[in-house]
Amino acid sequence: MKWDDPMIRRIKMTEGTWRTLLAAKSGRSVLPSAASDAAIALYGPIASSAGPFVLAQVGQSLDGRVATPFGDARDISGPEGIAHLHRCRALVDAVIVGVGTVKADNPRLSVRDVEGPDPVRVIIDCRAELAGDEGVFHDGGAPVILIQSRDAAQKTYPADVIRLRQGVNGLCPIDIIDALAERNLSKILVEGGARTIARFLDMDLVDHLHVSIAPLIIGSGPSGISLPPIRTLSEAHRPAAEIYSLGKDILFDCHLRAGRPATSERKRQKIDMADVKPSAVV
């Protein structure tokens, strides 16, 4: 497949298109047809979703790495890949990361490269490992919600703390989504890390998965998605996908829930969120 393959749609975001998408998010605009506009085709399902919507996003190298073995994850995505991530943040209500991502990257999780509102920042910190002095709590950005186990140590944070039942392996992703929905946060971006994304995939909660691939070979380091091992390729996920060009990066928009029930109708089978060791990057 060539970068100029007609199957690859190039994103050309105009100011007018972006404002239309932001207006659609708030219900003030009806989106035009996506047939002739790649930006509407890619971002429209996020902006116009009327009910619960979960998007997972991974930015990785050609060899599937999201960082070096020493934790350097900066500059994997090019400028347009970063703008894409910030557009996704602007179109959702909340962005979720695991505690390992906060420890390793000290992320702001804000919208800086595009116009739009910052999402509420949600951190899954099952065992209350964060001290409360991390940058995300004091950068003057959007509100922060901590998701913790009811059994975790009681600490005081400059954030809203939601304490949930902990199962054998940790917290349940459905409980997390339900708790956020009670706060009118229904459009969710699961941004990292690999095991956090994997648990939402395991639970069949992800509507769209965005995998952005940069022309970069790292050689070793953590992968973008860490699912349980399979024996044969017949067991692998093979989602329907559309392909977009983000400058030098290529984006796969995987439709994981095409033709299946909406979130509110999904089977309530409990699969717990893995309780990751403090040293792991998730």
Image (cartoon, rainbow, N blue to C red):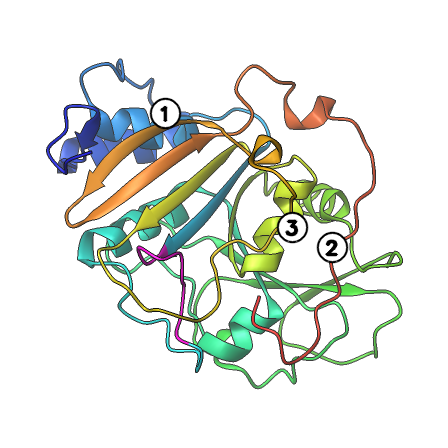
Q: Which residues are magenta?
A: 60-68
Mark 3 belongs to which amino acid?
Pro
Q: Nearer the viewer, residue 255 or 230?
A: 230
In the picture, the disc for residue 171 is none
The quadrant of the image that shows the C terminus is: bottom right
Extreme-left residue of the structure = 4
Mark 2 belongs to which amino acid?
Met
Label tally: 3
271 shown above or below 255 = below
Tell me the SS state at disc 1: loop
180 shown above or below 171 = above
Residue identifier under label 2? 273
- What x and y, as percent, mark residue 103? 54, 79
- Residue 157 can be seen in this image: yes
Task: State which mark lies toward you, 2 or 1.
Answer: 2
Task: State which mark lies toward you, 1 or 3.
Answer: 3
Q: Are marks 1 and 3 in contact (CB under 8 Å)?
A: no
Pointer 2 or 1: first along the chain: 1
61 shown above or below 232 = below
Residue at image location 67% in from the left, 42% down from the top: 202
Tell me the SS state at disc 3: loop
- What x and y, as percent, mark residue 275? 75, 65
Residue identifier under label 1? 28
- What x and y, as percent, mark residue 269? 83, 35
- Residue 26 can be seen in this image: no
Pointer 1 or 3: first along the chain: 1
